[in-house]
Amino acid sequence: MRPTTLTTLLLSTAALALASSCGGAPASARAQQILALTGVAAAGTTVYVANCGSCHGNDGKGTPSSDNVSIAARVKTRTPGEFIDFILLGVPGTGMLGFGGAGGLTDQQLADVYAYIDTVLAP
């Protein structure tokens, strides 16, 4: 059974509240909106390979161009909102540019990429 948008929103809100109480950074409003969407891992595969794979590797374990930054490991050390914000805004002082601006990825594409990373690359 696929979770409904309401179920996903409630779970995401609870996870963000828990993360905030444990010291995690609060997610931006856009990250919360993205987390409320139902991401489809299969759709996220194509978006990930086209936009993330060249630096982070199609397996998510990193490449020399990303200083071997493993997305698979990072998704487990950040709250979902923090992780989405990294994708949206980029990481200052690194080559990681944000994908949330004009001409970037849509909210649904970002939800799909997150589902792919979370369910396939970081089980």
Image (cartoon, grey):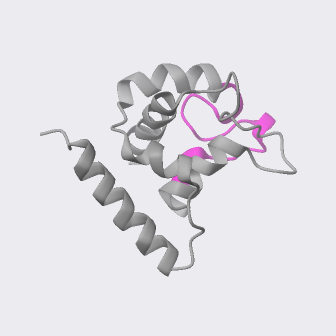
Does residue 31 sit above or below 64 in this rendering?
below
**Viewer-closest of 33 and 48:** 33
Q: Is residue 110 left or right of residue 63?
A: left
Q: Can you see residue 122?
A: no
Give x and y (percent) for residue 106.
54, 27
Work out which quarter of the rendered image holds the N terminus and state it.
top left
Q: Is residue 40 left or right of residue 7?
A: right
Q: Is residue 1 left or right of residue 93?
A: left
- On whether residue 31 falls in the magenta region, the answer is no
Question: Which residue is located at x 46 percent, y 46 percent?
Answer: 33
Q: Residue furthest right?
A: 93
Which stretch did the figure color magenta? 54-75
Question: Which residue is located at x 50 percent, y 80 percent?
Answer: 22
Give x and y (percent) for residue 40.
35, 30
**Viewer-closest of 97 and 100:** 100
Give x and y (percent) for residue 4.
21, 42
